[in-house]
Image: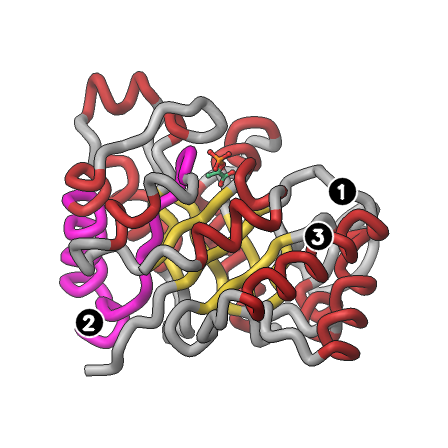
Amino acid sequence: MTKRIPLIAGNWKMNLDHLQAIALVQKLSWTLSDAGHEYSSAEVAVFPPFTDLRSVQTLIEAEKFEVVLGAQDLSKHDSGAFTGEISGAFLSKLGCKFVLIGHSERRQYHSETDETVQAKVAAAWKHGLVPIICVGETLEELETQGQAAVPVAQTIAALSGHETLGEFVIAYEPVWAIGTGKVATPLEAESVAKAIRAAITENFGAESGQSRILYGGSVKANNVAGFLASGEVDGVLVGGASLDAEEFAGIARFQ
Ligand code: PEP
């Protein structure tokens, strides 16, 4: 069985222009390097806005930084008359490894459904990207359906209907914990991650069941270790705290 290397992913959302982006990635890489960070023991990825990707990629390449690049979304289409959309082909060419799909803000403010997410997962694989599929329950769903039902159903929906599955990562992000300061307990994150893994294994086989499952929702340097302690959660997806190089480096140095 291959070891699941922890993934520390920073979703910048709609923050930082390309100059601010360069400054943050530079500071982050220097801070990690000063701390002797081993990227083979925790992969570190940043998800800047589309307009920053080229600048950040150029910097990463020029400085041989080991921080990995990802995008916050992609189009389900390859190319054509889709004004404002970004093709996975463009992201691949820019050196992106990962792409976030189905973040709760996309589901909530852009009406993305399980079908949209499934189509975008297919587009990611088609263009050689690793989708990070975001799943999670709202407060109302938590109260009416419990914690695991919605994230498990969203995971199965995203992975269904594909001829074969490529590499993917699941990010369990309770909607009520995103940007609110409310955090799931490590035990809750562990139990939902277990339920998601069991559902993946049952529906898509043991190999897919070894995919990385992250926790996201108000993660900080001072609470990250608890989530990773059990070995069920294979990393974190971080929003607000990823905009501060020292704080995010502190999260990546959780061990
Ligand atoms: C997110 O946006 O994926 C997230 C987890 O945000 P925050 O860390 O700010 O809660």
- The magenta stretch is 191-219
Residue 215 screen position, x and y as percent: 34, 46
Q: Please determine whether, in this image, residue 138 is positioned above or below residue 196.
A: above
CA separation in Å, label 2 and label 3: 39 Å
Mark 1 is on which residue type?
Leu
Residue 136 screen position, x and y as percent: 35, 37
Relative to residue 235, is residue 196 drawn left or right?
A: left
CA separation in Å, label 1 and label 3: 9 Å
**Which residue position is annotated with label 2?**
205
Going by the picture, which residue comes out furthest to the front? 34
**Which residue position is annotated with label 1?**
16
> Of residues 217 and 113, which is closer to you in this image?
217
Query: Could you say which disc has been placed on residue 158 in the image?
Result: none
* Residue pictured at 38% horizontal, 50% vertical: 171
Residue 47 screen position, x and y as percent: 62, 54
Q: Earlier in the sequence, mark 2 or mark 3?
A: 3
Which callout, 2 or 3, points to the residue nearer the camera? 3
Kindly check if marks 1 and 2 are in contact, taking CB atoms under 8 A apart as contact. no
Magenta segment: does it hold 21? no
Q: Earlier in the sequence, mark 1 or mark 2?
A: 1
Q: Quadrant of residue 159?
A: bottom left
**Which residue position is annotated with label 3?**
24
Mark 2 is on which residue type?
Gly
Q: Secondary structure at mark 2?
A: loop
CA separation in Å, label 1 and label 2: 40 Å
Q: Secondary structure at mark 3?
A: helix
Quadrant of the frame with the N terminus = bottom left
Magenta segment: does it hold 202? yes
